[in-house]
Amino acid sequence: MHLYPSLLAANPSSLHETVTVLNGVVPGYHLDSMDPNFTPMQGLSVDTINAIAQWSNHPLWIHLMADDPATHLDRFIVPVGTRVTIPVEISGNISSLIKAITARNWKPGLALKPGTSLEKAFPHLAHLDHVLLMGVEPGLSGQPFMPDVLKKIGPLQGAIASEKYTCSLAFDGGVNPATISLLDKEGIAFAAVGSALFTRPDLPKEQLLKNWNVLNNNGKE
């Protein structure tokens, strides 16, 4: 399982330095972009996300938590192959949004809140790069892990395998040394890690890299 640092949890005043430190060890970055109509929390600004795309040549994974994602897509200046995840709970035309993301040579994904039924994602699986299972309610870093979400993994894997689809499973929320091994065994392909990596705002470079190494060693020192 690949871990992506969720930069919303990092210190915003030293974000450039953080990306510079992590560029040598991470596979990519998870970037939360939030619309107040969808979640009350504030995410990374479009300008910040576009800047991160300049600071690193690693793949980006944008979780676009917006009630109307279509109005945001043209504002992103990010590389080909960027993953863009949208909420399955929105009222708009999801199929059209998936096509719009794909037309930009990005990789579309659907995110499901903990209480959302898997069936909402099933009609779109053939056209997705990934399905993101949320282990917490979206918007606030550091929430406790909701273990019942794990019950969705088996049925989702079965639906993908039965039709020979190629989309992967992703996870966000409550990813920490106690849950990483479990998610890996369950077949999650990649996951976002926030507060378990960025354990305090003034984190020294050495401790940041140590935290990263522990997380990538299934929580072992």
Image (cartoon, rainbow, N blue to C red):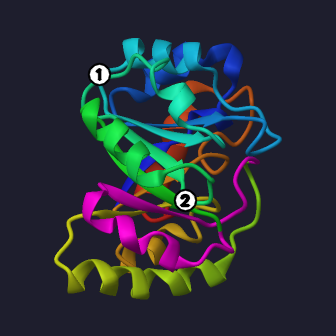
Magenta stretch contains residue 116: yes
Q: Is residue 167 left or right of residue 115?
A: left
Indicate the quadrant where residue 200 lies.
top right
Between 103 and 215, the one lying in front of the other is: 103
Tell me which residue sits at (54%, 27%) in the image: 72
Tell me which residue sits at (76%, 48%) in the image: 140
Q: Amino acid at mark 2?
A: Val
Tell me which residue sits at (76%, 45%) in the image: 39
Question: Which residues are drawn in magenta?
Answer: 114-140
Between 161 and 124, the one lying in front of the other is: 124
* Tag shown at residue 66: none
- In this figure, which residue is indicated by the disc labeled 1? 57
Q: Report x, y in % for residue 214.
A: 49, 54
Q: Amino acid at mark 1?
A: Asn
Proximity of marks 1 and 2: CB atoms separated by less than 8 Å: no
Element carrying mark 1: loop
In the depicted structure, whether residue 190 falls above or below residue 145: above
- In this figure, which residue is indicated by the disc labeled 2? 88
Label 2, residues with CA under 10 Å away: few <14, some 14-19, many ≥20: many
| Residue 46 in sight in this render | yes
Q: Report x, y in % for residue 117.
A: 58, 78
Mark sitting earlier along the chain (1/2): 1
Q: Report x, y in % for residue 132.
A: 47, 60
| Residue 26 in sight in this render | no
Magenta stretch contains residue 29: no
Tell me which residue sits at (64%, 62%) in the image: 174
In the depicted structure, whether residue 172 falls above or below residue 160: above
Q: CA distance from mark 1 to mark 2?
A: 29 Å
Element carrying mark 2: loop
